[in-house]
Amino acid sequence: MTELRADARRNLERVLDAAAEAFAASGPDASIDEIAHAAGVGHGTVFRRFPTKDDLIYAVVERHFAQMCELARDALASDDPGEAFFDFVRRVAELSMSTPGLHRCVVHCGEKPGAAELTRLVAKVVSRAQHAGAVRADVKPLDVQLLVRSALTSAPAGQWRRYLGVVLDGLRA
Amino acid sequence: MTELRADARRNLERVLDAAAEAFAASGPDASIDEIAHAAGVGHGTVFRRFPTKDDLIYAVVERHFAQMCELARDALASDDPGEAFFDFVRRVAELSMSTPGLHRCVVHCGEKPGAAELTRLVAKVVSRAQHAGAVRADVKPLDVQLLVRSALTSAPAGQWRRYLGVVLDGLRA
DNA sequence: CCTGAAACGGACTGTGCAGTCCGCTTACGT
DNA sequence: ACGTAAGCGGACTGCACAGTCCGTTTCAGG
């Protein structure tokens, strides 16, 4: 199963990269042809790996979640839980603001792929920071998510970093 | 120019109603065929009035803005500026949450149609409420808009009324 | 090398959509 | 009532896209 020919694996990676970029830029409306061309392969090659466009979107979203899980794990590995939390939030914000179309992709594929794992990790990051006294104790992970999301989505163009700063200050203990 | 035959005017209205409903439900992806069918006309009739799909979207958005302007004018006509303001915000929220797809339509047609008039009226509603001492003096119309929008967009399903209540309480003097 | 399986990619199909066209119908002034 | 211009709507075109197929190319093991 994992026995994938070298060229196949290389192309698969190119396709995923191109798809991530296209979906990040244009949301789920990006066409397969466009992605295949950007990846330098024929679009038949895309469909061999991902029988359906939705399968490709799904894969990209999963990868995106995995990136955020990675950030969360980094935060958990740090020995300063407070700063780790704030860094984590800032990085996640940076990531999602640099890929505006991906949110629509997540919505598009309804039930999320690996969201459970991500939720679990984030909860850990938050509670660790609270334990260290860096974050007020009366907020829950969901609150953090909603507050941050609202700051990002409602900020005027180019102002989201400032808005995020305000919210983060509000979360400090 | 306003000399429109009776049947033409009737159909035009039906089309606008159907379009408003369709765009509110599905955003700008709603098809002309679907709208024409819902309006009970052939889709040629739609294209005669609106040479382009974008023209139709534009018209619906303009109508939506006009509705909000109407609400603002109602608020300005009330003799209790404070309560008028809070009612106004609640009504606008109710309106936009009942037409989730319209926001994407507004985004779709970039520069907004009659946004200037709306902005002007809202500014009046806010400053009147502030003058009456019902709303804290240190917020600007833009702040109100952003705060309300963020409450609406970030609330979990079915919770937006509660979130809005919190924000409105926060705006009281 | 040489061979067979794996992978490739582009031609092809089917669908759904925006936008056009034109023969038919209907409102309305006289 | 009737003539005509305004209005109608569905057949048609063209295009963009998702998804299929198959003849050709390339990898990898012996």
Image (cartoon, coloured by chain):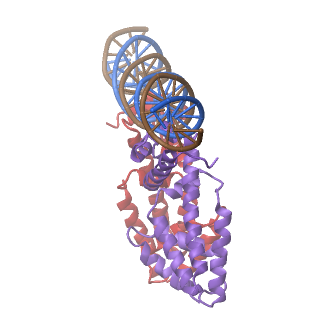
Chain colours: A purple, B red, C blue, D brown
Q: Residue at x 59, y 71 (%)?
A: A146
Give x and y (percent) for residue B23. Answer: 51, 46
Give x and y (percent) for residue A3. Answer: 60, 47
- Using the image as rendered, state which of residue B67 and residue B147 is in the foreground: B147
Q: Is residue C30 above or below residue A169?
A: above
Q: Looking at the image, can residue A79 be seen?
A: yes
Q: Is residue A24 above or below residue B147?
A: above
- Using the image as rendered, state which of residue B136 and residue A18 is in the foreground: A18
Q: Quadrant of residue B162?
A: bottom right
Q: In this figure, what is the number of numbered marks?
A: 0
Q: Looking at the image, can residue B127 be seen?
A: no
Quarter of the image with the N terminus of chain B in it: top left
Q: Residue at x 58, y 51 (%)?
A: A58
- Using the image as rendered, state which of residue B68 and residue A92 is in the foreground: A92
Q: Residue at x 53, y 70 (%)?
A: A150
Give x and y (percent) for residue C24. Answer: 45, 12
Give x and y (percent) for residue B98. Answer: 58, 55
